[in-house]
Image (tube, grey):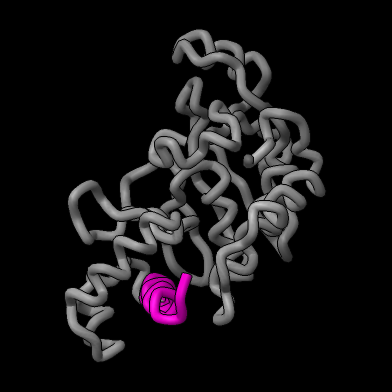
Amino acid sequence: MVYLRSEEHLERWLRAAGHEPGATFSAVTLNELAQRWWGSRLDPDWRPRPVEESQTILDDVGLTGAFWRLA
Amino acid sequence: MDAFDLAVRRVVYARVVADARPPTAAEVAAELEHDDDEIARAFRRLHDSHALVLRDGSLEIRFANPFCFDSTPHRVTAAGRAWTGTCAWDALGIPAALHRDGHVDSECACCGEPIELEVTDEELTRGADLLVHFVVPARRWWDDIGFT
């Protein structure tokens, strides 16, 4: 999970690293995901989150499709 | 995850936030007044359930996500302390977990040029033009969490 400056840098990095393209989105969306995903991590009553709830978070920030299926 | 393991996890995260470093199993044992062996077993169960990540063959905590105790390019300042994020996602996860504003100093994976992101009142107020790339599909994140 990396940051890139532009589409051009993304394509150059994928070629250099030999990675198949995965999923690309904006840092704004990543922050929305981070707020939802990690916001309860330090809660005193934290419990492991059911997969269905985690999937809902991904769906809610627009990360949908086969790549984002947790199970 | 039973109540004991949740209590161990709670102490681990409390120590991480207080000290900006992970506690040892012995430190958690002392705080909870339990045997070191009981805490060691709890650490391993928490690792197996992805609630912590231990170093290979060790009881040393490597990740208490989003907090990372390896060297990575993702340096985070939040709540008056310096932290390390495991990855791009976890770097933004640290201000989110702490419920504080935060600043991320990182780099472009392609060119290594420094980049900065800023989170204010939960919103990304700097770095909004940056892209993020995930190589590993969600169902395989835990196959090799260090790579993911």
Residue at horizontal 36 percent and vertical 57 percent from the top: B47
Q: Is residue B48 left or right of residue B55?
A: right
Q: Depth check: give the residue in front, A3 or A41.
A: A41
| Residue A53 is a magenta residue | no
The picture places residue B146, in percent across and down from the top left corner, at 39, 40
Residue at horizontal 23 percent and vertical 69 percent from the top: B40
Q: Is residue B103 left or right of residue B45?
A: right
Residues rendered magenta in the picture: B1-17
The picture places residue A11, in percent across and down from the top left corner, at 60, 12
| Rendered position, A21 above or below A37 | above
Q: Depth check: give the residue in front, B145 or B132.
A: B145
Residue B133 placement: quadrant: top right
Residue B13 placement: quadrant: bottom left
Q: Depth check: give the residue in front, B135 or B86.
A: B135
| Rendered position, B54 above or below B97 | above
- For the question of whether residue B10 can be seen, the reply is yes
The picture places residue A15, in percent across and down from the top left corner, at 51, 8
Residue B31 placement: quadrant: bottom left
Magenta highlight: main SS: helix
- For the question of whether residue B124 can be seen, the reply is no
Residue at horizontal 63 percent and vertical 41 percent from the top: A70
Q: Depth check: give the residue in front, B85 or B142.
A: B142
